[in-house]
Image (tube, rainbow, N blue to C red):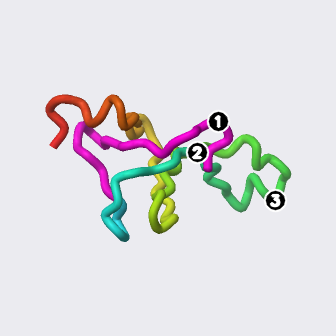
């Protein structure tokens, strides 16, 4: 799914294991998602809009968006979830 990614990843959010809010699946593709605003689009400044991390569920395709400083952490199958993840 991702341009350079070869496999989906496990995700933690604020130290907790994250699952899809629709189907409960644990594997996600990630990509940057632009948070477009009407004003910026109108003046041709869409490139200046903020972005968020988009997590796309590998099973159902639902897109979860995370903006701000506490972005989700991605983990490979080999790494697994980190110690202490609930």
Q: What residue range appears in magenta?
A: 1-19
What numbered label is drawn on residue 31?
2
User: Which residue has dot 1 on it?
Assistant: 4
Q: Is residue 28 left or right of residue 13?
A: right
Residue carrying label 3 = 42
Relative image position of residue 84 (x, y in whole percent) = 14, 33
Q: Is residue 61 above or below residue 6?
A: below
Mark 3: few/some/many CA within 10 Å (<14, 14-19, 20+): few
Q: Residues within 10 Å of mark 2 (few under 14, many from 20)?
A: some
Q: Main secondary structure of the magenta part?
A: loop
Whole-number angstrom distance, CA of label 3 to CA of label 1 = 32 Å
Q: Secondary structure at mark 3?
A: helix
**The C terminus: image quadrant:** top left
Rendering coords of residue 76 (x, y %): 40, 34
Q: Relative to the observer, which residue lies in front, 78 or 9?
A: 78
Q: Position of residue 56 (x, y in %)?
A: 51, 56
Q: Residue at x 34, y 65 (%)?
A: 21
Distance from the alpha carbon under mark 2 to that under mark 3: 25 Å
In the rendered structure, which disc, 2 or 1, sits on the residue that comes first in sequence? Answer: 1
């Amino acid at each position: 799914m991702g341009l350079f990614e070869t496999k989906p990843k496990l995700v933690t959010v604020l130290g907790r294991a994250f699952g899809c809010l629709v189907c409960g699946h644990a594997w996600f593709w990630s990509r940057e998602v632009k948070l477009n605003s009407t004003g910026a689009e109108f003046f041709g400044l869409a490139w200046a809009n903020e972005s968020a991390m988009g997590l796309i569920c590998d099973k159902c395709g639902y897109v979860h968006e995370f903006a701000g400083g506490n972005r989700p952490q991605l983990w490979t199958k080999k790494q697994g979830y980190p110690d202490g993840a609930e």
